[in-house]
Image (cartoon, rainbow, N blue to C red):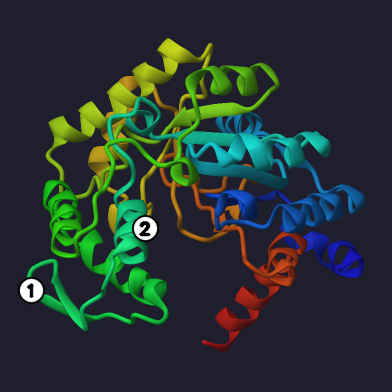
Amino acid sequence: MPWAHSALRPLLRDRVAIIMMHRFADAERGIVGHDPAALRKALASLRSNRVPLLSLNELCTALESHEPVEGVVFTVDDGYDDFATVAAPVFGEFDCPVTVFLATGFLDGLYWNWWDKLEAVLRDAAVLPNEVRVGRGTVVHLNSVDRLSVLPQLVTILKRLPERERHEEVMRLADELGVHLPDAAPGDRAPLAWDVVRQLAARGVEFGPHTVSHAHLTPLPREEVLWELSTSFQRLREEVEAPLPVFCYPYGLPSDLTDTVTDVCQEIGLKAALTAVPDYLETRDGAAVDMYRLPRFAFPTKLVDFHQIVSGFERLKRLVRRSLT
């Protein structure tokens, strides 16, 4: 959409779109995620349309100095190793800065992610019953033909539980359905290794903390929030020279954005925090910017939707909707 980038660029003056990504598809390893071909097309379009590609560090520095900037920032959450094998070469091909937020306990082998375990339970059960009870008695009807179709519903239900109860519930389901879950993450769900993180950092990839256990922070007492953030940041500093002092919320929805997290971030020297709330970041001098609630757009499945975000068409749609209400 070259015409859109040119015609709508004034709508994005002094605005930045921060993009949130997670996993990257690798058919040989059975990994489902962002299509690397789509990422390559997206980056090629941004470069051909001369859209500034900023590092998160550059953005935060500009915000701290009240310097207006515009462009696109790319971020990746969690720390799966498909970032290194699939995505990093694509970002490198276009000399595009990228920041990866690491759940440090994942990299240290202390756990593997509960939603991955849940997917493994559905996939590997010899026989699926017609229904299961999850959470605190919610009945979920299963589909033996399309086993993973209920995964989003199960994830939504389990997200509402306290951290320990959520993990216990996944293990209970595994036992109930006769699935053995290994202690270490299997290859298609493996984390980055620390030596790979250091190699990527030497090539310019930025890394920031994403808690130790990818915990849902909202229901946690302050001392546990402090432990999750400070321990994650400390592990990064032990493994990586000069990690980015910017935090990324697990989940990051509006209900997750508490003053407790902001206070803890400030206490331990984190200068900003990223959410999963989709919006543009306005950087003009005098704009009200909350450094601990910076918005991000999820990288869309369809490239046309991505182009709408980075060209300004998405902002035009929002302005039209606002004028009609």
Residue bearing mark 2: 253
> Residue sitting at 33 percent across and 46 percent down?
113
- Comes first in the chain, label 1 or label 2: 1
The answer to which of 73 and 104 lies nearer the viewer is: 104
Front of the two marks 1 and 2: 1
Q: Pointer 2: residues within 10 angstroms few (<14), some, or many (20+)?
A: few
For badge 1, the amino acid type reads Gly
Residue bearing mark 1: 137
The answer to the question of whether label 1 and label 2 lie on touching residues, with beta carbons closer than 8 A, is no
Q: Quadrant of the N terminus?
A: bottom right
Q: Is 206 left, or right, of 227 in this rendering?
A: right
Residue 4 coordinates in the image, percent (x, y): 85, 69
Question: Which residue is situated farthest in the front direction here?
Answer: 126
Residue 2 coordinates in the image, percent (x, y): 90, 64
**295, above or below 274, in the image:** below
Question: Which residue is situated farthest in the left direction here?
Answer: 137
Residue 116 coordinates in the image, percent (x, y): 36, 53
Question: Which residue is situated farthest in the bottom direction here?
Answer: 324
For badge 2, the amino acid type reads Leu
* Secondary-structure class at tag 2: loop
**269, above or below 176, in the image:** above
The answer to which of 43 and 60 lies nearer the viewer is: 43
> Residue sitting at 54 percent across and 50 percent down?
23
Task: Report which quarter residue 30 is drawn in.
Answer: bottom right
> Residue sitting at 26 percent across and 47 percent down?
181
* Secondary-structure class at tag 1: loop
